[in-house]
Amino acid sequence: MSLKGKVAIVTGGASGIGRACSVRLAADGAAVAVWDLNAEGAEETVAAIEKAGGRAIACVGDAAEPEAVVASAARTRSMLGAPTILVNNAGITSFCRFIDIDEEAWDRMMRVNLKGPFLCTRAVVRDMLDAGWGRIINISSSSAQTGAPAMGHYAASKGGVIGFTKALAMEYAAQGITVNNIPPGFVDTPMLRSSPIDVDAAAAVAPMKRPGRPEDIAAACAYLASEEANYVTGQTLSVNGGRYLV
Ligand SMILES: NC(=O)c1ccc[n+]([C@@H]2O[C@H](COP(=O)([O-])OP(=O)(O)OC[C@H]3O[C@@H](n4cnc5c(N)ncnc54)[C@H](O)[C@@H]3O)[C@@H](O)[C@H]2O)c1
């Protein structure tokens, strides 16, 4: 699946799923802009890509802050060229009984998980329209499909990402831009390990008896970014080891 000549942005590319997507898209030939708040992690991802013979830059900033997003988009354009692949992956989670979710926690979740994808998409969609080709891949969550206790704000934000995906897919279908989402389920990343979820216990009752690997999500991301997926848009590609069957 060659992405040679394409420029990709992966938000949250310093860790976990975002790092795996960055490495995979670079291995498939794209030049990758690794956007993250975490400068050290972003540079580590860039180093891994360069070591494998790929091309990447780090853009350090908050993917939910309008000025930072515009600045990262400009840096990406000037260093790598116009981006036509965007992976909206940066996200946060937290576990909190509904009764204890205050407005600040709700707003923080919506800002990073839902407003962030809006801002990042807005910053680069014109590049895609100019190219007559684009791929937007939103990382949602299986918790928006299944529901999840103590995750009302998180599940709501990710449900919003799924609706956003479908709306944009319809709006841009005739202009060569596809928009899809991947809801991961239990992927072994720093986010999952720092949550109250007992990963091994959850894996034991999962159909495949193991958590997902970031590379499992990256493979789906690479497919959706590829030319082969040109007739796929507005879809939810569940990569979850059979945890939830659509
Ligand atoms: N791991 C799972 O089981 C799982 C399940 C469902 C959905 N997801 C989703 O997958 C995505 C990646 O999760 P992960 O498990 O790799 O998490 P992770 O915590 O390992 O990585 C998330 C990355 O996003 C970055 N980030 C967070 N807020 C940011 C911001 N405002 N601006 C820029 N960067 C920011 C972090 O610095 C980090 O590098 C998230 O959207 C998450 O909600 C993960």
Image (cartoon, rainbow, N blue to C red):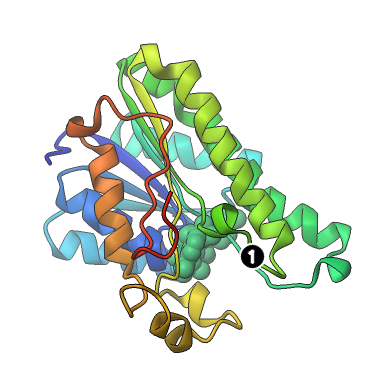
Q: Is the residue marked by circle 1 packed among few (<14), some (14-19), or many (20+) residues within 10 Å?
A: few
Query: How many numbered badges does the structure rendering display?
Result: 1
Q: Position of residue 244 (x, y in %)?
A: 45, 59
Is residue 202 depicted above or below 10 in this figure?
Answer: below
Residue 185 location, quadrant: bottom left
Q: Nearer the viewer, residue 206 or 117?
A: 206
Q: Nearer the viewer, residue 82 or 161?
A: 161
Residue at 55% of width from left, 26% of height from top?
Answer: 167
Q: Nearer the viewer, residue 60 or 97?
A: 97
Q: Position of residue 132 (x, y in %)?
A: 31, 15
Tell me if residue 123 can be seen: yes
Quarter in which the N terminus is drawn? top left
Q: Nearer the viewer, residue 143 or 31?
A: 143
Is residue 63 depicted above or below 191 in this figure?
Answer: above
Which residue position holds label 1? 148
Three-letter code, disc 1: Ala
Residue at 29% of width from left, 56% of height from top?
Answer: 218
Residue at 82% of width from left, 66% of height from top?
Answer: 98
Instruction: Identify the secondary structure beneath mark 1.
Output: loop
Left or right: 180, with 24 as reference point: right
Tell me if residue 83 can be seen: no
